[in-house]
Amino acid sequence: MKIGLEVHVALPTKTKLFCSDLAYENQEEPNSNVCPVCLGLPGAKPVLNQKALEISTSIAKALNCEINEKTWFVRKVYFYPDLPKGYQITQLDGAVGIKGYVNLNGKRIGIRRVQIEEDPARIIREKDYSLIDFNRSGVPLNEIVTEPDITSLDELKGFIEELRSILYYQGVNINQELKTDLNISLAEKRVEIKNVTGVRNLIAAAEYEIRRQSSLIQEGKEINAETRSYKEDTDETVSSREKETEEEYGFTFEPDLTFYDTTKLSIQKAVIASSVAKELAYKNEYSEKTIRELILFNKKNLSLLIGLSKDEFKKGVSLIEKLASFGIDDYSEEEFKKMIKQDISSLEKDGFLQLLGRTSKYEEKADEEEIEAGIKEMLSLDKSLLDRGINDGKAMGFMIGKVKEKYHVSGKEAADFIKKVIKSMLNN
Amino acid sequence: MTGKFLSLKDDEYKGFISRLKQANEKLNAFNFIDEKEKNGKIISVKDNICVKGMPATASSKILQGYTPGFNATVIERLENAGFSVIGKTNMDEFGFGSFGLNSENLAKNPFNEEYVTGGSSSGSAVATALIKEHVSIAESTGGSISAPASFCGVAGLTPTYGVISRYGLIDYASSLDKIGFMGKSADNIREVMENTIGSDPNDTTSLSTAISNKKPNKLYVIDNLMAGINEGIKDRFEDLLVKLSAKGYKIEHVKMDYLEYSVPAYYILSMSEASTNLAKYQGFKYGFKVKDFSLNYNEFFMSARKQFGKEAKRRVILGTFIRSKSIKQKYYEKALAIRHAIIGRMDKILKDGFIIMPTMPIFTPKISEVKDISPVEAYSMDMLTVPPNLCGFPHLSFPYFYEKGMPLGAQVITDHFNDYSLLDFLSEWENDFQYKFKEEVS
């Protein structure tokens, strides 16, 4: 069995991908959150949202991709009423990240490509006519294309869980935003299930399709290469009866944009955060999947996660208080405390982690804490480094270099921080 | 130096507009003349550049009735600097043409109405010749400023690609489109240009690089480029070189590889981009609207896109073909390589000299002579204007001779960002050269 995915998630930016309209869909009037750029008016030109580039690059790094130092965009040309310019601005060879992977219990699921693209407008189908709402036109999307390396339903579930935790730390909640094209082949012929919305439906569609293809094989029948769609009400996939010709999009370089340098983006904190998240998700596998257990059994990680300093930890500041002190976005401190105290285990870990992921305080702390832990580990492994002591500039330089390499940090600020940590440990 | 522009007092305005409208009836310089009174220095604008509240059709039926609600950056900057837009000038549909023939209402050459104006900025050239002390904001993709400037006896400056923001320009080929200027005084063009340059947050490809005016004393003539040129033009051009060498310029003859591929490379790249830029015209959001909602999507789009003229359809079809997966490498990627090769070669010699050449390889043709020529014949007329356009080098077409009453233009090219040297050259030329025009409206 081979399963490959093309996953689309909305990037959590304030504004659209190529203009300054708000990126999130609100409950406002249709076509009220629009401008010449996202309406594709003649003369308007796209200007790339740097934040979208940062988050997408960050996701690509977290998925262990090779990052294209110079990333660029293409026009994908086709006619559809939801596409105001007659082409979608997307990426192909110049994608932000390529050749990545996700580790799944020691097995690598390949990531072919991580790319940025714009969302088309929304079509609202009425009985005998359709309406178009351009409020969604130009919302930034991230597409993650996997290799067909997933070989079982369990692996698919595992992969989605892994992806979920990685994306949380970039502020993406896949429960709300996930849209997937799913390729499944049990035999030679490839079946594509297009436009499955949400995690639940993705799993249900895969389950159905695996059953369908295996029974065809058992009956000695042939599996057709085809495009199918998923029906939410019956959990079935049905043939879309589309012609199986290769689509011709006439991809061409987007000349209204330029080449973008990804080497200068500030994405390190998010990457480190996402590695912590991965660790949490991994631990989560055997800890009954509740945050309560994370709090009870993985204090180190959680304190990292929420930015609880060692002093606070020693002083016995409770995690719940600390969490509440953030007064995160949608909740007042009181509400948050109440919510957690009432029944922490009933909180869906998704929503909970998401709230944590949105606090920038955490990211800063995690950065330093993790590096500090790394330095300690390194020094405990190589005692001779400590012995040579602080006055040996070479040894210090070597240590700093090692730490920098391990945590992909650079610059004088990082070096100073590492030095400070090492010195403080030598003094103890 | 500041220019001298036509600006009108309230009581003069009505008279001016009626004289302009009268002249426009026979010459078709304008697609639209704004009758509202203006206080500023009068300029006109090619109809593919958006001016808030004025129609913008790019001379296409598919944009009939479209009035943009925003100004192009150049217009915004010029209005802030005290300029007023009098109207929108005629052009080949979407900029597709070298003679001005691809427009419903054909613009006429102000020297003789039987002759072509050149294109695609046909109306800008005519308006510049017609209106006293005028500058028209035009646009060039492959020669759309130089060609009509040459045939209509005005100066045309095409700046370095990226120096003038394209925001608000209705795209033909985004990587080649350059907004530029036509005028009959270097000072006027300079004043307009100085008020438009500089990077624009709304156009990613715009640049903030400073513009220099390094004056070279060498003029390079590319001998192999002169091969396909009309003999009479060659003779006049030789005379021009004699005049320029008397002014102290050193003439040097060189050969340059790959130039014979520049026209095909240009058309491959420009059609490829044009076919995507024209995909937005679908007949339901602005401009021409399809009224029959019983059609399915494909029928609906097709009935809208029938509104394109013949040349627009040709370029969309060829451009789409060029982009198709199986043949992209065969044409598109080779064209890109040619573009880079020519940039490299021109760049080398432009470091210490201008390149000079006639602007067009033929004398101004009559409309009847070129109306029915094949597309390839028409494209080959761009052999001299395409190289600097393909490579984004700034270039100037200036009038230097009147052959049986019709003007002739020559073209000088300089290095990227040395645009002002071309205006210095024009000033120097204007010291001894007298522009001639049949009539001027003021």
Image (cartoon, rainbow, N blue to C red):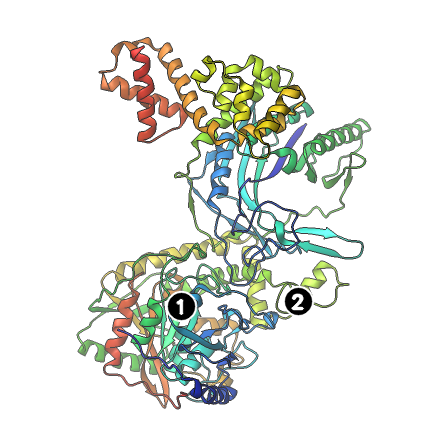
As shown in the figure, which amino acid type bears the numbered disc 2?
A: Ala
Query: In this orientation, does residue B221 appear?
Result: no
Image x and y of residue A413, in percent = 33, 29
**How packed is label 1: few (under 14 Cα within 10 Å), some, or many (20 or more)?**
few
Where is mark 1, residue-wise? B80
Quadrant containing the N terminus of chain B is bottom left
What's the CA distance linking mark 2 and mark 1? 37 Å
**Which-is-in-front pick, marks 2 and 1?**
1
Query: In this orientation, does residue A261 appear?
Result: yes
Residues A324 and B390: in front is A324
Q: Which mark is residue A300?
A: none
Q: Are the residues under marks 2 and 1 on the same chain?
A: yes
**Circle 2: element type:** helix
**How packed is label 2: few (under 14 Cα within 10 Å), some, or many (20 or more)?**
many
Label 1 chain ID: B
Say whether residue B77 is left or right of residue B239. Answer: right
Q: Which mark is residue B304?
A: 2
Q: Is residue A125 depicted above or below A12 in this figure?
A: below
